[in-house]
Image (spheres, coloured by chain):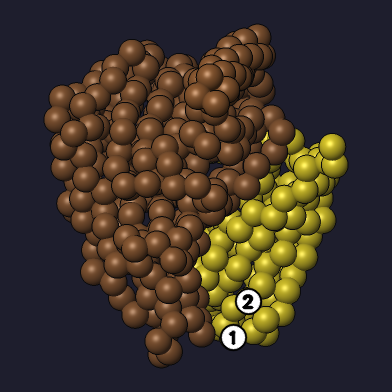
Amino acid sequence: MQGMETNKVIENAADQNLEEAMLRAMRLSDPALSRFDPMRRIISFDQFSKGYAGWSQLVGNYEGSLDTMLPGYAQHSSPMLSTLGHWDAGSHGGAGSSYALKVATRPRPGAQNVAIKRHTFRKRGPIRFETYFTFKPEATELQLSETDVRSIGFLFDLQGGDTDQNADRIMPHLRFLNAENGEHLQKWQYKPQTSDFTAIGKGDKTASHYHLEPQGWVDLPGGAQRLCYNEIPTKVNWSYLRFDFDLGDMKALAFQCNDREFDMSGFESISIPAMKNLWCMLNFAVFAETDVAKSAFLYIDSVCISGDF
Amino acid sequence: MLPESHTAIVTRNEHWTGSATSQPYECGWAREAVIFVRALKPSVGVQPDFSVELSPDGMRWVPEGTRVAMPAMQDEIAVARITNFGNWLRIRADFEDGSSSTVLVTLHLKA
């Protein structure tokens, strides 16, 4: 009897090894996926030559009138499918096709814009967010303009299931602070706290908080990084980014940008009490912020979101 | 695969006075666009036409030729249909002193 159980364990291990080997071989032989290192199951794989793939603008909460929307959200607008068309060199194109998702801010200092993709999860385990991205200011001047984009970044918006014991709303944020007030800072930061909640409208159903306000960002230890910017505003280079997060204990596991992997032991997410309508929420967002009276553009070539389940 | 079809909100609940424009929208993938302008509140004063503008680079703008009267009443919707517009689109309205409108501008694009 013990021998049969041993054989079963060996068979299961062999099946798992075979699955891992086949998955690895199939993904490495697929030119679109071989640029990524997804976990076992792919939750979504978005190439923007195939459309918006569910990436839409982050609209603010309101009740009764749009006037009740917080100003931070009121400035947001719809993302675009862009060929990175430039006045001097034509369409730059994406990393893998002619198109990338474009998140453009208004042309005023401090303006922000956010694109979001909304899911729910089916398993509270590790997930992985991978993307190829780049950023530039609008090429309104014949200058390098390397300090015109204040920041670009991403966030998750998560909440446990309705029967979970620890079902807080958790929002890991990371941004690349490129520049502030003209100073070229080039470092990764996280955000451990959000602003106070504001009641929206006259009922008791809606509240809002602008979690991307400029205050409260903290330097990621060892998070200084000089990214490839190139030599005029219309030349761009794509960078790779990977963020691993455990939906089980709601902790960051790993963060990589290009050749650098950062220590996430000191990372903290925004943590707020669970909200009454957001069970199993699994949202992903990317954002851009300008430092000057010029639009900042964040371009996303592709996104692969995967999970270990 | 079905052809791409997309609704983009390029101006939402903005109070337009003087020379006003919608956010430039890059949409070279689309063959046709329908532009709706809805007055979210009662407009004030004489309402101008809005004009559709094209651009070679998203920064410099030229009139496309289409002009449509801005909506005068709350919840009235003005509409323009265009094709052959290149890579960027926006609309522009020039209000005389004392006139204004609070608008929702949406683009409806099809490949």
Q: Residue at x 45, y 61 (%)?
A: A161
Q: Quadrant of the N terminus of chain B?
A: top right
Check the residue under mark 1 and report the chain it is in: B
Q: Is residue A72 visible?
A: no
- Specify whether A277 is left or right of B2: left
> Residue A41 in the image: x percent, y percent?
58, 32
Q: Which labelled disc corresponds to residue B39?
A: 2
Name the residue nearer the viewer: A77 or A249.
Answer: A249
Q: Evaluate if marks 1 and 2 touch, with contact meaning CB atoms under 8 Å apart.
A: yes
Disc 2 marks which amino acid? Ala
Name the residue nearer the viewer: A191 or B82.
Answer: A191
Disc 1 marks which amino acid? Pro
Q: Which chain is yellow?
A: B
- Specify whether A152 is left or right of B50: left
> Residue A165 in the image: x percent, y percent?
34, 63
Residue A178 in the image: above or below residue B93: above
> Residue A158 in the image: x percent, y percent?
41, 54
Check the residue under mark 2 and report the chain it is in: B
Name the residue nearer the viewer: A82 or A276.
Answer: A276
For label 1, the residue is B42
Quarter of image, res A183: top left
- Specify whether A68 is left or right of A95: left
| Apparent colour of chain A | brown
Indicate the secondary structure of the residue bearing disc 2: strand
- Specify whether A278 is left or right of A273: right
Q: Which labelled disc corresponds to residue A102?
A: none
Name the residue nearer the viewer: A258 or A135.
Answer: A258
Q: Residue at x 31, y 29 (%)?
A: A254
Residue A115 in the image: above or below residue A273: above
Q: Is residue B106 visible?
A: yes
